[in-house]
């Protein structure tokens, strides 16, 4: 029996993880849940799973949560909050496996703490690998902790890499759906609304990652995540647009063989793989290969999706540039969702923040968080200037 800490339990990945626990009660149980602000769902999950500890984003929410637990007649559950709370969830002695699925750098310290505490990590939170991958992978090596990717592309690469040695890999191919605007005329990009951008063609996910998929910054973050998870330079990490999202990614070996992983577009499969690795439990997540008529692959359009170019540039510089790429995007996506800037202004904000970022390589999580905050501040300033000048199109055009 594996006792899980699920960080980000109320999110899309967190809920899919709990559905795996539901399906395999003989294999998994829930020791710790870390949620953000969704009190009612956190309560529902606690009543269902009886964890030992629950964390909420703030002290106020934690107090409200504890009061609701008392009303429901549930006692003996520790209620904690904030970063210290999610760290407490991730490091409890009874926890055997940590699912890292908080969105953004809010999940970074708990993920790092889990590794230092020797807990195997199922990693969905790509932002923490982008911001602090060098530190996290070093800590994982030193503490002999496996980091098992849950992000479907990296999970696919992990699976395909089991077929050969690392030195035999020529390059890896990350597949990208291309998002909802793959064919939209470029002149219409200025008028894209949050509603249009939130309509992903193949995956149902949280809001930030859905917008990141529409700008293809998500693929950019995944390029950096892949470099770090699989110890490869950016030149060996390629992107191919595959609108069906049937092939989740591919590994090309030096002899010319290319291995692909195909399965349903359902996050429960990579989550199950990470939880059960190296086993493969039987599941009902089958893919009807007989019904498959064709697979398309296209070159990504770097002019249409400048975030891809920005990500390769940041990946080459590493350190503060990767941190800034992620931080600036988080601020710009929020501003876009609030209708304060236009869709193209997301990439323009990131580009300007990157231009203003000095080359540096933070050596600790504290330094990463400082660089992250500096980049956020620069992004906020740009967004507010853009906002003052009529919705971002005038100063943040690219
Ligand atoms: N969804 C997918 O299919 C998918 C695929 C690959 C990778 N990922 C990655 O997995 C991560 C989660 O994605 P998602 O789609 O599940 O996102 P989501 O649905 O937006 O969920 C985010 C989770 O993080 C929690 N959270 C946010 N801020 C927090 C804070 N300050 N402290 C504690 N918890 C906080 C949220 O809590 P509340 O809701 O309670 O506020 C929620 O549980 C992201 O890094 C994403 O890139 C997701």
Image (cartoon, rainbow, N blue to C red):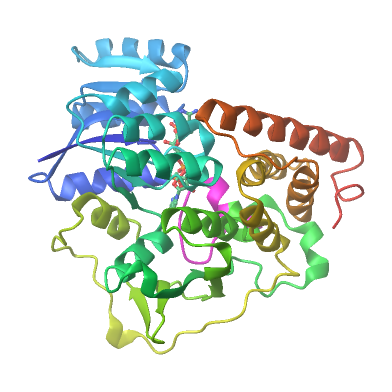
Q: Nearer the viewer, residue 237 or 266?
A: 237
Question: Within the magenta stretch, is there residue 202?
Answer: yes
Query: Quadrant of the image for the C terminus?
Result: bottom right
Task: Tell me the chief SS of the magenta region.
Answer: loop
Query: Quadrant of the image for the N terminus?
Result: top left
Write the residue at 69% across / 63% down: 309
Q: Is residue 186 left or right of residue 260?
A: right
Q: Quadrant location of ligand 1?
A: top left
Indicate the quadrant where residue 315 lies.
bottom right
Q: Is residue 45 left or right of residue 248?
A: left
Question: Within the magenta stretch, is there residue 375?
Answer: no
Judged from this view, the residue extending furthest toward the left is 26
- Please state the total of marks drawn on the protein image: 0
Q: Is residue 141 left or right of residue 252?
A: left
Write the residue at 33% across / 39% down: 142
Identify whether 135 is placed above or below 190: above
Q: Nearer the viewer, residue 253 or 106?
A: 253
Write the residue at 21% across / 26% down: 51
How far across and how far down the image is residue 200, in percent?
Answer: 54, 61
* Residue stretch rendered in magenta on the structure: 196-210
Indicate the quadrant where residue 111 lies.
top left
Is residue 75 something one can see in this rendering?
yes
Is residue 198 something one can see in this rendering?
no
């Amino acid at each position: 029996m594996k006792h899980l800490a699920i960080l980000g339990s109320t999110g899309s990945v967190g809920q899919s993880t709990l559905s795996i626990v539901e399906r395999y009660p003989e294999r998994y149980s829930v020791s710790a849940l870390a949620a953000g602000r969704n009190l009612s769902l956190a309560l529902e999950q606690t009543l269902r799973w009886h964890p030992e500890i629950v964390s909420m984003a703030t002290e106020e929410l934690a107090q409200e949560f504890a009061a609701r637990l008392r009303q429901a007649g549930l006692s003996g559950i520790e209620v904690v909050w904030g970063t210290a709370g999610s760290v407490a969830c991730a490091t409890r002695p009874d926890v055997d496996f940590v699912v890292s699925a908080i969105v953004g750098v809010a999940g970074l310290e708990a993920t790092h703490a889990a590794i230092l505490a020797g807990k195997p990590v199922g990693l969905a939170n790509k932002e923490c690998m982008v911001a602090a991958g060098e530190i996290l992978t070093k800590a994982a090596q030193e503490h002999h902790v496996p980091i098992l990717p849950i992000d479907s592309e990296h999970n696919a690469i992990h699976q395909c890499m089991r077929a050969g040695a690392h030195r035999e890999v020529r390059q890896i191919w990350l597949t990208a759906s291309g998002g909802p605007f793959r064919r939209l005329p470029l002149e219409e990009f200025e008028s894209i609304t949050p509603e249009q951008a939130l309509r992903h063609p193949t995956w149902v996910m949280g809001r930030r990652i859905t917008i990141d998929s529409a700008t293809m910054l998500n693929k950019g973050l995944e390029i950096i995540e892949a470099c770090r998870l699989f110890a490869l330079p950016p030149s060996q990490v390629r992107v191919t647009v595959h609108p069906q999202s049937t092939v989740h990614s591919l590994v090309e070996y030096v002899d010319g063989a290319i291995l692909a992983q195909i399965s349903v577009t359902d996050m429960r499969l990579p989550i199950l793989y990470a939880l059960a690795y190296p086993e493969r439990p039987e599941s009902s997540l089958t893919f009807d290969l007989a019904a498959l008529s064709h697979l398309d692959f296209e070159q990504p359009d770097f002019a249409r999706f400048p975030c891809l170019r920005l990500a390769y540039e940041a990946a080459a510089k590493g350190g503060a540039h990767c941190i800034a790429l992620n931080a600036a995007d988080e601020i710009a996506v929020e501003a876009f969702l609030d209708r304060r800037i236009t869709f193209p202004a997301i990439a323009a904000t990131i580009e300007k923040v990157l231009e203003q970022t000095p080359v540096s390589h933070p050596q600790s999580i504290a330094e990463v968080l400082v660089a992250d905050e500096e980049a956020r501040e620069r992004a906020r300033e740009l967004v507010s200037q853009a906002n003052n000048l009529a919705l971002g199109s005038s100063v943040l055009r690219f």
